[in-house]
Image: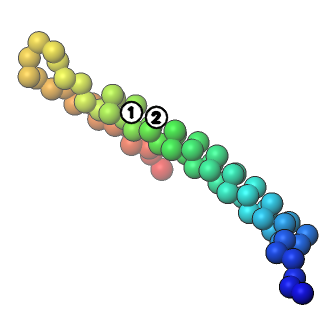
Amino acid sequence: MTEPIFDHERLDVYCLAIAYVSSSYRIGKTNLKRIVSMLTRLIQRTETVSEGSTERVRVRARVPQS
């Protein structure tokens, strides 16, 4: 006879793997939202185009002091 395909040890490993992938997905999704939000704010803050002319106004980004 052959050994069963699923035993308790393998099922425990599968459950841990599923939990890990699930938490990694959530963390990745949260980080992606933060990055997109940060880039959106950066774009809005650094360059504004006047609608009446082709003149551009550049604003310097704040540089943190160490």
Residue ID at (46%, 34%): 37
Q: Is residue 9 visible?
A: no
Q: How far across and how far down the image is residue 64, in percent?
A: 44, 44
**Circles 1 and 2: CB distance less than 8 Å?**
yes
Residue reaching furthest to the top: 52
The residue positioned 62% from the left and 50% from the top of the image is 25
Residue identified by numbered label 2? 37
Q: Gap in Å between the C-alphas at discs 1 and 2? A: 5 Å
Q: Position of residue 20 (x, y in %)?
A: 72, 58
Q: Residues within 10 Å of mark 1 (few under 14, many from 20)?
A: few
Q: Please, is residue 40 above or below residue 51 in the view?
A: below
Q: For the N terminus, which image quadrant? A: bottom right
Numbered disc total: 2
Image mark for residue 17: none
Q: Secondary structure at mark 2?
A: helix
* Residue placed under numbered mark 1 in the picture: 40
